[in-house]
Image (spheres, rainbow, N blue to C red):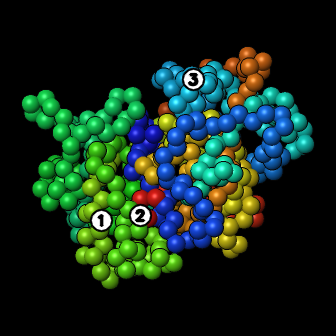
Amino acid sequence: MMDRTTFGGALRAAAVAALATIVLAGCRTSKEVPGDPFAPTDGPGLVKLGPNDPMPDVSAAYARKSFYLERAANESIGWFQKPSSKQWFPFKNQGTSEEVCTHEQAASSVVAFRDLLTSSANAQEFSAKFFEMFDVWQSVGYTADREVLFTGYYSPIFHASREPEGKFQFPLYTRPADLVSDPVTGQPLGRKMADGSTQPWPTRAEIESSGMLKGTELVYVESKLDAYIIHVNGSAKLIMPDNSVMYIGYAGKTDRPYFGLGSALVEAGAIPKSQLSLSSIRRLYRTNAALVDQYIEKNESYVFFTEYPNDRWPAGSLGTRVNEDATIATDKTIFPRGGLVMVDTRANTFTRGLVEYKNFMFDQDTGGAIRAAGRADLYMGNGAAAELLAGGQVANGKMYYFFLKPEFIAQFPLPAPEAKKPRKADATPSAEPAKQNANLAKPAARKAQASAGDDLK
């Protein structure tokens, strides 16, 4: 919540990452957010650090390594093995001819990092070898100090039905045949008309009131708010009436503008700014659904879905599975796909609030509200616990990218893809969310599919 626009494995395209700002408003003081992290970035998004520049504390990040980090590395390697990944390289710094990395360099960097992660005896050895092998690039952020605003996103779990029955009367739709998107970027372009022209799509209110999508329903949920949250997240795990599980993800969106629900409710005086959260929006919906529905309809953007196999859910914009504590969502027009990243910020915990968080991650997703060098979204897992963590994740920090120095690239070739194994069906709810969310609460801390706050904000 996943360039989320190109979505061959797309989850959160523009609408997805949007969920993380759900609570961004009112959670922190203006001193912590001195500029505008949402303002477009003019010029280069990255700056290469020299030998005299302060370097990130990779030793601390190494100390936090986990199962999820190694799994995320494997996901990125799998993406680099796809021929289609080459279209995004060589990657050049925005607005310049400066080359940040080639496809071979980016892929070899992940392979080398994975090897170094497992072969290093301790943090000191890791750090020494790491800086010998890797060049360091830093996000220009949105302030003079190169600060980046880090929010969180998660994958929600809802009850649903494949048929409109009982309380399940609010549909999510499959991608319409007349939805036109850019074949390379996935950017929505409009609606293909009978005369061959392309016109803007109707608004959310017009789509739902006209019944124009009747017959393309994928699944039904319990309320318009549930459907909206899934739109914002770009994915969901759905529990059916017979307790079987359905996984859905982003399949495209219309070309209409996005309108934040949470900030609109604050401006309307329906929710105090200091209390804005997904929980407060849900409470308001229980007492005044008509009011919330009114503001939901102001968001003209509309998202479509497809069913995903359980081993690919939740999928990010690269089409790979995103991993809690190891996947980050950024603006893919500014930052390279699939690469190794380190964040140095504060992450939300259940009992200690925001604590220091220095962690390696992989850039495997994007979202509608993640559109500048000063914004990034940390994936928090799935389910109710992840929702709480994501909703409270709002903190500034620094963000770094790492690529092998040219002389080391040939030593770490991209391995050949492994033969695919037959997939086993899984109709029972996964126990994984509990393991993921437990990891989030570790003292060393951390902190969508969607940005848990961007879209609801």
Question: The C terminus lies in which quarter of the figure?
Answer: bottom left
- Marks 1 and 3, how far apart at CA: 42 Å
Residue 369 to residue 160: above or below: above
**Residue that numbered label 3 is attached to:** 97
- Marks 2 and 3, how far apart at CA: 37 Å
**Residue that numbered label 2 is attached to:** 456
Q: Residue at the spot x=81%, y=44% of the render?
A: 54
- Marks 1 and 2, how far apart at CA: 9 Å
Question: Is 393 on the left or on the right of 155, as rendered?
Answer: right
**Residue 188 found in image quarter:** top left
Q: Amino acid at mark 3?
A: Ser
**Which numbered disc flags the more N-terminal residue, 1 or 3?**
3
| CB atoms of marks 1 and 2 within 8 Å | no
Question: Is 139 on the left or on the right of 331, as rendered?
Answer: right
Q: Amino acid at mark 1?
A: Ile
- Give the mark toward the camera: 1 or 3: 3
Find the residue positioned furthest to the bottom.
Answer: 287
> Secondary structure beneath disc 1?
helix
Residue 249 to residue 243: above or below: above
Question: Is 147 on the left or on the right of 175, as rendered?
Answer: right
**Residue that numbered label 1 is attached to:** 296
Q: Residue at the spot x=63%, y=43% of the render?
A: 140
Q: Residue at the spot x=67%, y=71% of the render?
A: 353
Residue 158 to residue 400: above or below: below
Where residue 393 sits: x, y (%)? 59, 63
